[in-house]
Amino acid sequence: MNLMDGETVAALVAGGLALGLLAPRLRDRLQLSRAKHRSLAGHARLSRRIAGLVPRYVYGDDLFFRADEASEAVAARRRAGFEVLAETLRSGPGRTLRVTSEATRHISDLQFTESYRVPFQFSPRVRAALPAGAFVASSEGVQVTDLDGTARYDLSGSYGVNLLGYDFYKGCMERGARRVADLGPVLGAYPDLVADNARRLALISGKPEVSFHMSGTEAVMQAVRLARYHTGRSHLVRFCGAYNGWWGDVQPGVGNPVAAHDTYTLADLSEKSLAVLRRRADIACVLVNPIQAMHPNQGAPADSTLIASRPDRGVSRETYAAWLKALRQVCTERGIVLILDEVFVGFRLAAGGAQEYFGVEADLVTYGKTVGGGFPIGVVCGDHRLMKRFRDDRPADICFARGTFNAHPYVMGAMNEFLLHLDSPAMKQVYRDLDETWDRRAADLNRRLADRELPVRIGHLSSIWTVCYPTASRYHWMFQYYLKAHGLALSWVGTGRLIFSLNFTEEQFQAVADRFVAAAEAMQRDGWWEPGALATDRAIKRRILREMASHLLGLPGRRRKESLVGPQPLDAAL
């Protein structure tokens, strides 16, 4: 009995010790789970698994126009409007479309973008009837002209590069090239312009040291690597929905074939995320893309994923600034490197970038896109303690980062022209009136849309706009084609992101607004915004889930047999 009692006591003691050792880990794991956003985007591994299960199917002729169970009369209006739109977009010599079709066979990027302009159920028919040209011949002012001579107002912004107008960048590239013409493509040794560029970037960023790279993605990679090197910690924190380049550690979910093991994806604007930062000892850095103020905890909006409504979920400048300051305080307390990824928004919000705009100081700042003056570029700015790539007391312990084309003379020449203009009185005036100008323009357009009872609105962060759809519909993605037919050029993500260059005059902006309103009125006349029986987000999403389950499991059903078709040749699908 005494022996049994001793064994019982020993077992209880061992169990207690084990529980004591496991309890902190379990508590930390629970805290981490609670700090994730309650969406697929907030759970990277789960989103990758679910993405692998989504079956491909396309809508047949009937369901293409009645995916929301609209009446036959509405479907007939949509069909007629679709045919007229197709004819409009195909009018003219057609060289742009022919070159695009021929090139798509050889360019994998085009194969991707052509397939993902709209939700996949609609994509084959749209690609066949409403093709999008991918080639342009020239740019001038705020317009781009395709191979057929058709000029459109450019709202693509060259993915953020075009801040000041294409003519400005042509000048930067030409003048910069002349300044380094005698040097040519000498690499390794620096052109003398590098010194001035570094000095100017140090003043802008408030950081004394600079390193140059060939892209924004590379700049972010180096910033994270430096943070890990100097903290000796393994993990980075990124926020749900944020884009920080396409490399693995910052894209742990859909799009990355391999799971990221040293990345925590936490909820933006969340006290629970701050609690994780306060507790965990393995976090090297926190990565922030300020564009997330427009859509916290959601991926960059694209029409390819637009299956129901898209309300404006942006937060105010003051709200996001308060969040960044709270983040700054926690990072300082815990010795975590705060990285501000300004590759996209840098110099668009203020001369001092997002640091100035939101009133927060980062430890490392990355720039790219527009700062290259029209050429590819990535920049990291930081203090010496974080930028240093070697240890004085351990000569073999280094943090290596080089690139053959880093600080290319022609890039440095164009960059210097950009930075010189950034410091000009003319740019200071632009920044003084920037928010007032774009707030007024967005408000004026929203007022016009509301007066006409059109179910579309604008959400914006300065000159970066998102077309928002406050009511549910299966067909919001069609709007991009009406905008194109009315003379507006968009990027491949459609109406998810419109990027204005700052050289739009009032007259030019009004021309864009007139076309925008006319396109919305045409879309409404053609019945795409007429509500069907599926008139709510919930009803639409439930229907799509049932469709996917039906195809995934091979379940029989009248709707599946008559209205949905699986993978097959395009002509059969149509």
Image (cartoon, helix red, strand yellow):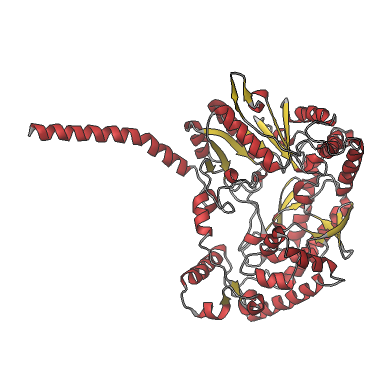
Q: Residue at x 63, y 56 (%)?
A: 311
Task: State the image quarter where residue 418 is shown.
Answer: top right
**542 left or right of 169?**
left
- In the foreground, 358 or 109: 109
Q: Is residue 157 above or below residue 182?
A: below
Q: Residue at x 30, y 36 (%)?
A: 19
The answer to whether any part of residue 379 appears in the image is yes
Q: Position of residue 399 (x, y in %)?
A: 62, 30
Q: Is residue 66 above or below residue 432?
A: below
Query: Which quarter of the image is occupied by the N terminus?
Result: top left
Query: Which quarter of the image is occupied by the C terminus?
Result: bottom right
- In the foreground, 244 or 463: 244
Q: Is residue 500 above or below residue 149?
A: above
- In the foreground, 424 or 78: 424
Q: Position of residue 239 (x, y in %)?
A: 58, 43
Task: State the image quarter where residue 343 is shown.
Answer: top right
Q: Position of residue 161 (x, y in %)?
A: 78, 46
**273 left or right of 28?**
right
Task: State the image quarter where residue 532 is shown.
Answer: bottom right
Q: Residue at x 80, y 59 (%)?
A: 489
